[in-house]
Image (cartoon, coloured by chain):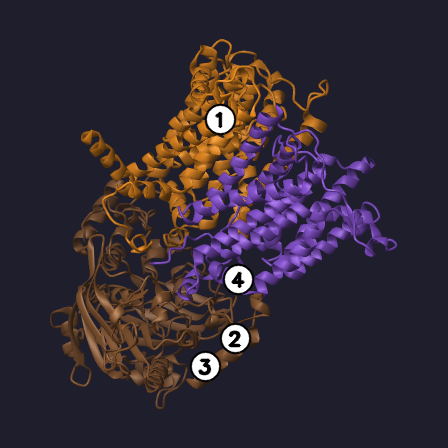
Chain colours: A brown, B orange, C purple
């Protein structure tokens, strides 16, 4: 770290807490940040919004010393700094709370908070664990966090883990806190809790920058909002003067239809029926308990809920990746509870998996080989022994063409494509087989807005053709807009099935948090959203 | 001068950036580096060894016994200098082809089969016992050979396959790491084979631990006088290499085995039983190890006896150097066949220990394991067209 | 798992009973046999907890054993004369240097840890007999002097158990190293960093600690420990034998399994190693009383079979979550 001589004596009164001047960051073949000027005043909350890949995280990584800018300079409290790494940034009073928490699961809250700055005794030959617990406790109390310093990280909730991350930064003397997508993993109620914490921090004189792509949250929590698009700063507005539509236009560069036009459902016979099904996870803990529902031809059945409430296990049981511990699954009139995954594929079940880089694609295969993934035993692609590469290639060319996969190169490896194009390819591969059921789990996670619209349109096309669709998403907007009926999962149970048009976001939030909002009981919800729809 | 440099730069550029060619270049570079380090080892150890006619004297250090260039050229001479040595080289090549393919089949499935050695030892014993038993029942002519040799190969494949299946099952259903289990199974295989030959199926008239010589009908017809090398065995090996390539590129089961190896979670998504595929791959790998043992008995030793050479471990280097590509194994097994057969010559005429080849093999494996080493060399010398993707390089 | 390890050690002692009275001298013998396995296990814990899976422990033991004997031999040719402690020191340095090279390959050049570890083993397996042949003209060394036994004052005079406390220095070192390793891993800052480095290196990095340095130190420590273990083995026997799998004969891999049994806990790993040491004693006593009717060659297989059984039950579930992964601090 080096500070300019002229200002080495300290902060300049009146200067902005953060001033990033003309920041450009180039990666091979990409300009992630293009001449960005960005300033944040002390004691304010500043939201940084933009699509995935707009350069938000890169800009903050520059501020946090993880990246060295190609051009431009950073001033903190008016003092110019060149960070050689996060520890320099920390010394300058900057703390970052990453989207994926930087916590060691096997260690305690206190151990994580003091990691790297452990208090010691006996001349450094032992850590002073009592003092670490004491200091953590004191810090938590000062900001009103309810945390047990001796609890192990993998035993506390996501919301609590986030608070540990904030404590970690505060313990290191952070005055400026950067939060990367802090609300992505929280329930609406937990989000409110986080915003309360932010207010508490501002009251203590801290400065906060938070990265988000949720415009509503930016408007609610921030004093000022900066919008990034394609690596450039589009503008900075005061949240009091801005509207969601205006921000969306700045973010995307054109008018966006925030509401989707959706014709009425033409519901047919039930295709998928799940009865009294329970699923245990790999550790033998019940993840899904006693779930009942049916998905009909021509409808989108949505499942909302905070991540980790049994959705993944439910989907894996339906798609055949995981055996349920009890209950039955019926698909197209046949019992498939114990059928293999490969049989289910043969019967016309398409599946867009939640983690595309782990499940739906082999990252080191080209698109040609990926086009065969899951289809390899279908009669169109092989005789069961020998692969018909010719028709596979035709199929892949079709998918690339129809689903606008760019670049249209079937011999390029999957990992060389952007998230959006990977997902369009998967969607195409699964949809072009004329499935009778589509199981789509987080189909637009980590995908650009253009691709999101495209995927939504295709889902609704299939629905119009009479395909049954089971949709799981942690994006509330998405499940509300696309679903004809919406189930809410909490702690492995379906706590309600509601009409997505008739339920408010607050009610959904309460349901997701496991509480029963007034006027909606599980029973009445089923009736309202269920057979009468 | 500048033209040469440009050409070199172009080559290194591709080493740094390109992918399919990159692997080939990394293999070649690993080989070169290992041979150079081997040469340094030879040269330095020459000052420790004692000999009658030193090749070099360095004041203050002493007399050096070995000239690396002479050692390597003697090695080549010893491998190709006469029909008999050529036969020896091709015989080693054939055996390495099978052990290399055994290791490669496991590698393709994402598994390290360090147990080819044990699979080979037990497969060899099964072959010896089978052909010794079968020998008296068949006519002593070509017809007998056509019956006995395939039976011997089958016996080796079955027992080797079984010995490979064990770590496969342990990996698939108990998550036991196959590197350790296969190494343990090597120790166990050697002990079991020793015990069986010593106490039950050995030649009672001999003090050593060995079986009787297998009947002539079970011996591969030798192609070169004074050598036991057989074109039939080599041809079989080449066919198997081609067959395995077709398996992986043209068949559903090959596609599924490979997918399971590259990305197990995606394989499950595609409807594959990943556990069963692990067992299949390890069984197939073990069977090839067993066939290597069968070839060893029916082409090289004509009996089972203790101290079977470490062809199974050599197979690791053969496979890794070939990038686990079945066709690539053909040239790499020839390369290591040359080294092994040449090592006998350097020991006989120069006194350099044969274990030199094992050190070189180990070094090759080490270099192949770290492709980044060559990429960095490429970049540090100013080649490579792009800066690193992260800013680490700039900050360092 | 700590209890499982301790339980297995009890079983080992019970087995000892079957094949002869468990007396002070058989326990002392088991401890002697524990030394190379135990040091490999403790060293492996440092490395793997820090995030570098060191499958080359076997190779490091070989290097330690060879270097100790070679140093004794070389020293005897100098005016200094053969000195066990100096040779011991050289062996430790040699093994640590090889471990450092392995660490550089894994950290600097992002080598696949398992393949690189395998290479360390194969290189050592080739190098030791190669060098033996160069120095002595054959794969086995001539006899050299080894450690002499020390009697611990007071304890050695105890009735019945006194013999246990007459031991060579490496045995004492091992008895100290178990608890000491536990203390370092569980009670010091460095121990906390080791754990974080293997579990979540990014968390450690963002906390301002140099992950790579922690990993280097952890891996080199595994080399130091293996140097002690290998040297102790060779200086007990008083010879290096390089035929077949060399005199180390799989003890590094057994040590690796021992720390899995002990679930990365040094105390558990110590007891698990003691179990394997006890098995060697059983083997010897069976060989001595060969009238039992069990072929000795098959009894020798017992430790390896136990390793297999243990692996089936232990699996690899408790591995540090980032062990085996490369870590780059800036992405």
Q: Quick check: marks 3 and 2 in contact, CB under 8 Å?
A: no
Q: Which residue is mark 4?
A: C190
Q: Quadrant of the C terminus of chain A?
A: bottom left
Label 4 residue SS: helix
Picture quadrant of residue C83: top right
Q: How far is disc 1 from disc 2 in space, using C-alphas?
A: 57 Å
Q: Quick check: marks 2 and 4 in contact, CB under 8 Å?
A: no
Give the number of the disc on residue A139: 3
Label 1 residue SS: helix
Q: Which residue is mark 1?
A: B42
Q: Is residue B56 left or right of residue B308?
A: left
Q: How far is disc 3 from disc 2 in space, using C-alphas?
A: 11 Å
Q: Are both tags, 3 and 4, on one chain?
A: no
Label 3 marks a residue whose chain is A
Kindly identify the residue that appears in the image at 40 percent across and 34 percent down: B321
Q: How far is disc 4 from disc 1 in space, using C-alphas?
A: 41 Å
Image height of A505 relative to B60, above or below? below
Upstream in sequence: badge 3 or badge 2: 2
Give the number of the disc on residue C236: none
Q: Are both tags, 2 and 4, on one chain?
A: no
Image height of A193 relative to C314, above or below? below
Q: How far is disc 3 from disc 4 in space, using C-alphas?
A: 24 Å
How packed mark 3 is, by other alpha carbons closer than 10 Å (few <14, some 14-19, many 20 or more), is: some
- Nearest to viewer (mark 1 / mark 3): 1
Label 1 marks a residue whose chain is B
Q: Which residue is mark 2?
A: A132
Image height of A367 relative to A314, above or below? above
How packed mark 4 is, by other alpha carbons closer than 10 Å (few <14, some 14-19, many 20 or more), is: many
């Amino acid at each position: 770290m080096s500070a300019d001589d002229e200002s080495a004596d300290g902060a300049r009164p009146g200067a902005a807490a953060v001033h990033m001047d003309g920041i450009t960051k180039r990666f091979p073949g990409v300009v992630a940040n293009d001449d960005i000027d960005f300033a944040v005043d002390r004691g304010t909350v500043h939201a940084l919004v933009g699509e995935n890949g707009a350069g938000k995280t890169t800009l903050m990584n520059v501020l946090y010393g993880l990246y060295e800018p190609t051009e431009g300079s950073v001033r903190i409290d008016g003092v110019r700094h060149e960070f050689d790494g996060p520890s320099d940034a920390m010394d300058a009073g900057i703390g970052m709370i990453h989207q994926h928490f930087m916590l060691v699961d096997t260690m305690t809250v206190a151990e994580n908070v003091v990691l790297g700055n452990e208090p010691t005794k006996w001349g450094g030959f032992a850590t002073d664990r009592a003092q670490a617990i004491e200091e953590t406790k004191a810090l938590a109390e000062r900001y009103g966090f309810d945390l047990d310093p001796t609890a192990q990280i993998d035993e506390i909730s996501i919301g609590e883990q986030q608070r540990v991350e904030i404590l970690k930064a505060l313990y290191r003397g952070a005055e400026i806190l950067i939060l990367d997508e802090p609300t992505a993993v929280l329930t609406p109620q937990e989000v409110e809790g986080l915003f309360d914490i932010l207010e508490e921090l501002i009251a203590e004189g801290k400065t906060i920058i938070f990265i988000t792509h949720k415009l509503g949250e930016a408007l609610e929590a921030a004093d000022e909002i900066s919008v990034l698009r394609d690596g450039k700063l589009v503008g900075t507005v005061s949240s009091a003067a801005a509207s969601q539509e205006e921000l969306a236009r700045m973010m995307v560069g054109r008018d966006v239809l925030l509401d989707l036009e959706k014709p009425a459902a033409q519901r047919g016979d039930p295709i998928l029926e799940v009865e009294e099904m329970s699923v245990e996870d790999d550790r033998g803990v019940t993840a899904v308990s006693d779930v009942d529902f049916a998905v009909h031809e021509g409808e989108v059945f949505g499942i909302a809920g905070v991540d980790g409430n049994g959705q993944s296990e439910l989907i894996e049981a339906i798609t055949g990746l995981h055996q349920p511990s009890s209950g039955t699954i019926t698909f197209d009139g046949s019992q498939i509870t114990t059928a293999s995954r490969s049989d289910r594929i043969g019967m016309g079940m398409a599946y867009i998996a939640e983690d595309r880089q782990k499940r739906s694609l082999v990252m080191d295969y080209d698109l040609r080989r990926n086009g065969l993934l899951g289809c390899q035993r279908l009669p169109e692609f092989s005789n069961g022994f020998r692969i018909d590469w010719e028709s596979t290639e035709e199929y892949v060319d079709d998918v690339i063409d129809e689903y606008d996969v760019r670049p249209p190169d079937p011999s390029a490896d999957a990992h060389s494509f952007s998230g959006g194009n990977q997902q369009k390819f998967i969607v195409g591969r699964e949809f072009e087989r004329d499935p009778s059921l589509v199981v789509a789990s987080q189909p637009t996670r980590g995908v650009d807005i253009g691709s999101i619209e495209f995927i939504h349109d295709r889902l609704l096309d299939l629905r119009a053709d009479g395909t049954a669709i089971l949709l799981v998403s942690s994006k509330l907007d998405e499940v509300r807009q696309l679903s004809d009926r919406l189930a809410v999962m909490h702690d492995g149970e379906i706590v309600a099935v509601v009409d997505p048009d008739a339920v408010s976001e607050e009610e959904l939030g309460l349901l997701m948090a496991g509480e029963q909002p007034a006027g909606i009981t599980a029973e009445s919800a089923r009736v309202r959203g269920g057979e009468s729809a | 001068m500048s033209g040469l440099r440009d050409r070199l730069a172009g080559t290194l550029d591709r080493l740094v950036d390109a992918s399919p060619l990159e692997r080939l270049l990394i293999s070649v570079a690993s080989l070169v580096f290992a041979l150079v380090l081997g040469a340094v080892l030879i040269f330095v150890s020459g000052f420790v060894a004692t000999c009658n006619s030193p090749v070099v004297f360095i004041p203050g250090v002493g007399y050096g016994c070995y000239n690396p260039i002479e050692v390597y050229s003697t090695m080549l001479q010893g491998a190709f200098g006469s029909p008999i040595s050529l036969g020896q080289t091709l015989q080693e090549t054939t055996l390495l082809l099978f052990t290399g393919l055994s290791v490669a089949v496991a590698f393709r499935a994402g598994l390290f089969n360090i147990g080819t050695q044990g699979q080979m030892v037990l497969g060899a014993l099964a072959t010896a016992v089978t052909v010794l038993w079968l020998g008296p029942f068949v006519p002593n002519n070509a017809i007998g050979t056509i019956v006995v040799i395939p039976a011997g190969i089958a016996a080796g494949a079955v027992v080797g396959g079984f010995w490979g299946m064990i770590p496969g099952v342990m990996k698939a259903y108990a998550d036991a790491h196959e590197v350790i289990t296969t190494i343990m199974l090597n120790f166990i295989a050697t002990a079991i084979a020793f015990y069986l030959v010593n106490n039950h199926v050995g030649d009672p008239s001999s003090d050593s631990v060995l079986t009787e010589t297998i009947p002539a009908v079970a011996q591969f017809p030798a192609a070169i006088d004074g050598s036991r090398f057989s074109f039939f065995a080599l041809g079989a090996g080449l066919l198997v290499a081609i067959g395995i390539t077709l398996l992986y590129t043209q068949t559903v089961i090959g596609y599924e085995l490979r997918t399971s190896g590259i990305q197990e979670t995606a394989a499950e998504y595609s409807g594959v039983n990943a556990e069963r595929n692990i067992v299949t791959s390890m069984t197939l790998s073990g069977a090839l190890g067993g066939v290597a043992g069968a070839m060893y008995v029916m082409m090289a030793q004509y009996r089972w006896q203790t101290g079977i050479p470490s062809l199974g471990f050599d197979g690791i280097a053969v496979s890794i150097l070939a990038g686990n590509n079945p066709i690539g194994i053909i040239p790499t097994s020839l390369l290591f066949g040359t080294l092994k057969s040449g090592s006998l010559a350097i020991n006989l005429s120069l006194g350099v220990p044969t274990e030199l080849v094992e050190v070189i093999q180990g070094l090759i494996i080490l270099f192949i394991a770290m492709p980044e080493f060559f990429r960095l060399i490429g970049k540090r010398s100013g080649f490579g067209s792009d800066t690193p993707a992260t800013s680490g390089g700039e900050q360092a | 798992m700590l209890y499982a390890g301790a339980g297995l050690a009890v079983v080992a002692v019970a087995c000892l009973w079957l094949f002869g009275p468990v007396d002070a001298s058989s326990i002392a013998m088991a401890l002697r046999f524990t030394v190379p396995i135990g040091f490999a296990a403790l060293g492996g814990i440092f490395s793997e907890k820090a995030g570098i899976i060191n499958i080359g422990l076997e190779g490091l033991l070989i290097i330690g054993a060879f270097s100790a004997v070679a140093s004794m031999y070389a020293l005897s040719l100098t005016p200094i004369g053969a000195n066990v402690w100096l040779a011991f020191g050289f062996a430790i340095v040699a093994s640590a240097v090889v471990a450092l090279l392995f660490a550089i390959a894994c950290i600097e050049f992002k080598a696949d840890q398992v393949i690189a570890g395998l290479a360390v083993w194969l290189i050592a397996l080739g190098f030791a007999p190669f060098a033996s042949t160069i120095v002595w003209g054959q794969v086995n060394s001539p006899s050299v002097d080894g450690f002499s036994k020390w009697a611990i004052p007071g304890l050695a005079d105890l009735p019945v158990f006194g013999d246990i406390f007459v031991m060579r220095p490496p045995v004492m070192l091992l008895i100290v190293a178990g608890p000491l390793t536990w203390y370092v891993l569980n009670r010091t800052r460095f121990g906390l960093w080791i754990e974080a480095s293997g579990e979540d290196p990014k968390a450690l990095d963002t906390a301002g600690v140099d992950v790579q340095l922690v990993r280097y130190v952890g891996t080199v420590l595994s080399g130091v420990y293996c140097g002690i273990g290998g040297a102790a083995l060779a200086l007990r026997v008083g010879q290096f034998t390089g035929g077949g799998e060399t005199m180390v004969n799989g003890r590094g891999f057994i040590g690796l399994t021992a720390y899995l049994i002990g679930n990365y806990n040094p105390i558990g790993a110590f007891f698990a190693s003691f179990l394997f040491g006890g098995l060697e004693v059983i083997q010897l006593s069976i060989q001595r009383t060969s009238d039992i009717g069990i072929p000795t060659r098959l009894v020798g297989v017992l430790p390896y079979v136990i390793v297999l059984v243990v692996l089936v039950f232990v699996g690899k579930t408790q591995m540090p979550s980032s062990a085996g992964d490369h870590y780059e601090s800036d992405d």
